[in-house]
Image (tube, rainbow, N blue to C red):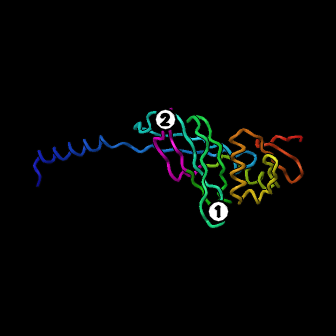
């Protein structure tokens, strides 16, 4: 049997310990595919009730491309963008075998302050697979990649993302020989 003083001391110690605990921040990620649905915008919302991420201003996304032929995983990291902006990523779990991404959080000076690991984004599009079935090839710079090659060729995937990050146009050839840009607008070449 414990005395009232012992119970009060134990309760006080428990309350003090609980006050020191902070809830972990949570993140919600939403993926908005472009016309070429393996590329798109990833936007995040952070729930941080205890202010663990105070000073969070920017983020980047580390995502998987297709593995090397020997099975070695290949990752790429998006550009660092403002927390209210969208990061452009390659996201195609059917081809890469990976459905999770890592979200890196930075302060204003781009010092990494937190990492959310294995986040599975919610895909915001009902028509991505329908649109994708009409794509025959992708034009990246002066090269044309068959869509199947782009699905599984790491070098082609890296080139695609480098072109997008550099602000160059990427074109998509549809099965009816129409050429469109990443937004799905017809282009005359």
Q: Quadrant of the N terminus?
A: bottom left
Answer few, some or many: residues within 10 Å of disc 2's Cα (few below 14, many 20 plus, some between 14 and 19).
some
Query: Magenta stretch: residue 108 in it?
Result: yes
Is 173 on the left or on the right of 27, as rendered?
A: right
Query: Magenta stretch: residue 12 in it?
Result: no
Q: Which mark is residue 149?
A: none
Q: In the rendering, at what x and y percent does residue 90 appear?
A: 66, 50
Q: Label 1: which residue?
A: 68
Nearest the viewer among 147 and 164 is 164
Mark 2 lies on a secondary structure that is: loop
Which residue shows up at 60% across the image and 63% down it? 72
Is 18 on the left or on the right of 116, as rendered?
A: left
Magenta stretch?
102-121
> Residue 50, relative to residue 123: is it above or below?
above
- Disc 1 versus disc 2: nearer the observer: 1
Which residue shows up at 54% across the image and 51% down it? 119
């Amino acid at each position: 049997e414990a005395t009232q003083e012992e119970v009060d001391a134990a309760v006080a110690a428990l309350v003090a310990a609980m006050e020191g605990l902070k809830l972990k921040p949570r993140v919600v990620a939403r993926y908005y595919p472009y016309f070429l649905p393996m590329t798109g915008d990833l936007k995040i919302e952070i729930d941080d009730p205890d202010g663990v991420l105070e000073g969070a201003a920017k983020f980047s996304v580390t995502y998987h491309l297709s593995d090397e032929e020997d099975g070695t995983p290949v990752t790429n990291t998006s550009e660092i963008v403002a927390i209210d902006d969208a990061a452009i990523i390659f996201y195609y779990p059917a081809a890469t075998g990976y459905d999770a991404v890592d979200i890196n959080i930075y302060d204003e000076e781009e010092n990494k302050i937190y990492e959310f690991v294995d986040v599975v984004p919610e895909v915001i599009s009902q028509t991505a697979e329908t649109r994708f079935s009409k794509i025959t090839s992708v034009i990246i710079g002066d090269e044309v990649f068959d869509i199947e090659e782009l699905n599984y060729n790491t070098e082609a995937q890296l080139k695609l993302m480098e072109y997008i990050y550099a602000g160059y146009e990427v074109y998509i050839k549809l099965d009816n020989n129409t050429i469109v840009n990443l937004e799905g607008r017809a282009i005359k070449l």
